[in-house]
Amino acid sequence: MTALPPVVDEQTWREELAKLRIREKAATRELDAIAAARRRLPAVKLPEYTLIAEDGSRVTLAEIFDGHSQLVTYHHMWTDGATWQCPGCTGGTAQFARPDIVEPLDVRFVVVTNGPMDEILAYKKRVGNRMTWYSSAASTFGADMDAGPGEGFAYNVFLRDGDDVYRTWHTTGRGAEQFMLTFAIADVLPYGRQEVWQDVPDGWPQHATYEGWPGSKEIAERYGDPAA
């Protein structure tokens, strides 16, 4: 039998929705306040890092901005020589099919990983990724941004003033969920993410954490080049 919430008349439903809306609006105001505080964070001036672009050229971190004043980097977990890289990173970056949509905000959004560029390009094609990638294999950039070899993923935000680059924000773990379309959609669904840690009514469908996420191979089957 399908798990169903209590079924009520429309007036009762609207009253309950209005009660929830009060909490939703309070959360929105709190997120606005957090964003305002984030805009007031201090910054750290960075040294001149050199990364490797997709064409094999060496570029400075300032050049990765491509003329913009702001930069967001997603640091993709990487294991050299592996056919399939981190499924969470692979699925997460697969959602950004048009990352240039944020460029009117004077920002560029790219992927950085610690792997070698030849493997990166092959993997990008294999899984159908649409973003621009850079390799930090020849520098300490990944480690210095809290996403070094053998470590986890991360988002970092930078601000550029001429050739000077400043690190302004960083997050990892569940802090990355604000970037994820799948979670935003799942959290408004009756069954939610269906993971065992979530607070749900009795009888609601649940499975182990991560079990419902598509793996790297599934991402490749949906979006990638079969010949890669």
Image (spheres, helix red, strand yellow):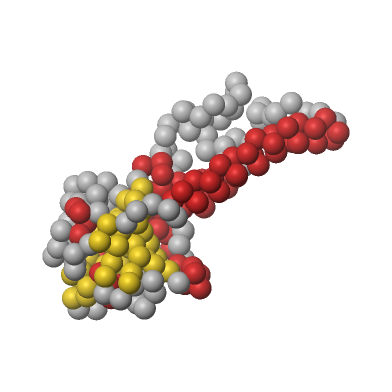
**Which quadrant, please, contains the N terminus?**
top right
Position in image of residue 154 (x %, y %): 32, 51
- Where residue 98 appears, as percent x and y from the top left, is 48, 69
Q: Is 210 located above or below residue 43 in the figure?
A: above
Locate residue 198 relative to residue 24 in the image: left or right. left
Front-most of residues 168 and 74? 168
Q: Residue at x 65, y 42 (%)?
A: 25
- Judge by depth and name the residue closer to the eye, 68 or 216: 68
- The residue located at (36%, 42%) in the rendering is 173
Foreground residue among 225 and 113: 113
Residue 134: image location, x then y, percent: 26, 67
Q: Give residue 72's position: percent from left, percent from top.
A: 37, 62
Horizontal side of 207 relative to 81 (left or right) equals: right
Q: Who's the residue at 36% across and 78% down the image?
A: 67
Residue 9, placed above or below residue 111: above
Quarter where residue 112 is shown? bottom left
Q: Is residue 8 left or right of residue 139?
A: right
